[in-house]
């Protein structure tokens, strides 16, 4: 498991030990963290789709309902029936298909990305990087301008040869719900309880320790609900025995 430490003196991630191998500074227990990353193609990743669909689908559904409600209020059932006969349902399906095609195009244009996850004493962080030679179209597909990405390179987590394009930092105390999805080796973090802020996809061999780290850190906060609960996990083990 990539258990590492962070040297505040030289601002570098180091192997766990008593002193930093780069500057000789003293390392503390508080600086320990889990650090790992994944490479992915956004158009093939469900959670990248999820980030767009959580906005697009409610807007589409609300538009459908408002138009239908407006017709019903103005002319009752006959007006609603007439709207249906004029192909309103088919038009909305075409709009839905167009929206999905647009989302696919946006995700495809983003290109390959690398995501670095950090779990430390303060919370969970995710930093997304793309190639330094990425074109402006890939940035616009992420709703970013070149000027915005240039400003992000001032972050201490910016890496040489890569361009930082997204960062999500979620403190433990702000979390309202954590979903442990073992089948997908993914940790889902919510704030508020109904809104997914971050999905941390772990390498298979590192998932168990990442889950244990999250459970240990969230125990300090009564407002955080972790699912499945540890009791449920124990009962399943007992039944198997």
Image (tube, rainbow, N blue to C red):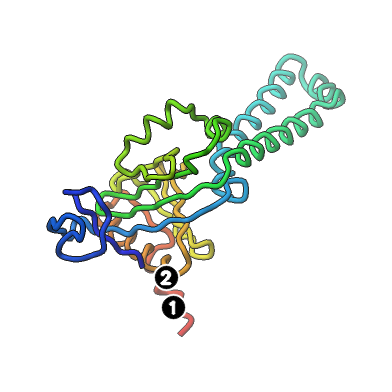
Image quadrant where one finds the N terminus: bottom left
Residue 27 position within the rendered picture, expressed as x and y whole percent measured from the top left = 16, 59
Q: Residues within 10 Å of mark 1 (few under 14, many from 20)?
A: few
Q: Residues within 10 Å of mark 2 (few under 14, many from 20)?
A: few
Distance from Cα at disc 2 to Cα at disc 1: 6 Å
Label 1 residue SS: helix
* Left or right: where 227 falls relative to 56: left
Q: Nearer the viewer, residue 56 or 33?
A: 33
Q: Residue at x 40, y 53 (%)?
A: 178
When the figure is inspected, residue 21 is found, relative to residue 234, above or below; the finding is: above
Residue 106 position within the rendered picture, expressed as x and y whole percent measured from the top left = 62, 36
Residue 57 position within the rendered picture, expressed as x and y whole percent measured from the top left = 62, 36
Residue 89 position within the rendered picture, expressed as x and y whole percent measured from the top left = 79, 30
Mark on residue 233?
2
Mark on residue 110?
none
Q: Nearer the viewer, residue 43 or 20?
A: 20
Q: Residue at label 1?
A: 237
Image quadrant where one finds the C terminus: bottom left
Q: Residue at x 43, y 56 (%)?
A: 37
Label 2 residue SS: helix
Q: Residue at x 42, y 28 (%)?
A: 148
When the figure is inspected, residue 63 is found, relative to residue 43, above or below; the finding is: above
Residue farthest to the right, as pictured: 85
Mark 2 vs 1: CB contact within 8 A: yes
């Amino acid at each position: 498991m990539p258990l590492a430490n962070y040297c505040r003196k030289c601002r570098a991630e180091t192997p766990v030990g008593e002193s930093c191998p780069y500057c000789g500074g003293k390392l503390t227990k508080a600086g320990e963290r889990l650090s790992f990353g994944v490479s992915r193609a956004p158009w093939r990743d469900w959670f990248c789709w999820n980030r767009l669909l959580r906005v697009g689908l409610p807007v589409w559904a609300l538009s459908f309902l408002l138009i239908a409600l407006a017709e019903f209020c103005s002319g009752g059932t006959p007006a609603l029936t007439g709207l249906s006969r004029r192909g309103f349902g088919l038009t909305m399906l075409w709009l839905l298909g167009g929206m999905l095609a647009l989302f696919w195009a946006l995700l495809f244009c983003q290109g390959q990305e690398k995501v670095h996850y950090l779990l430390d004493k303060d919370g969970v962080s995710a930093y997304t990087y793309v190639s330094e030679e990425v074109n402006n179209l890939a940035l616009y597909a992420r709703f970013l301008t070149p000027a915005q990405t240039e400003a992000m390179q001032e972050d201490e987590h910016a890496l040489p040869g890569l361009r930082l394009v997204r960062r999500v930092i979620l403190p433990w105390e702000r979390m309202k719900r954590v979903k442990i999805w073992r089948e997908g080796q993914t940790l889902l973090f919510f704030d508020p309880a109904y809104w997914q802020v971050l999905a941390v996809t772990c390498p298979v061999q590192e998932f168990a320790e990442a889950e244990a780290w999250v459970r240990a850190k969230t125990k300090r906060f009564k407002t955080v609900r972790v699912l499945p609960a540890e009791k449920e996990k124990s009962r399943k083990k007992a039944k198997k025995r």
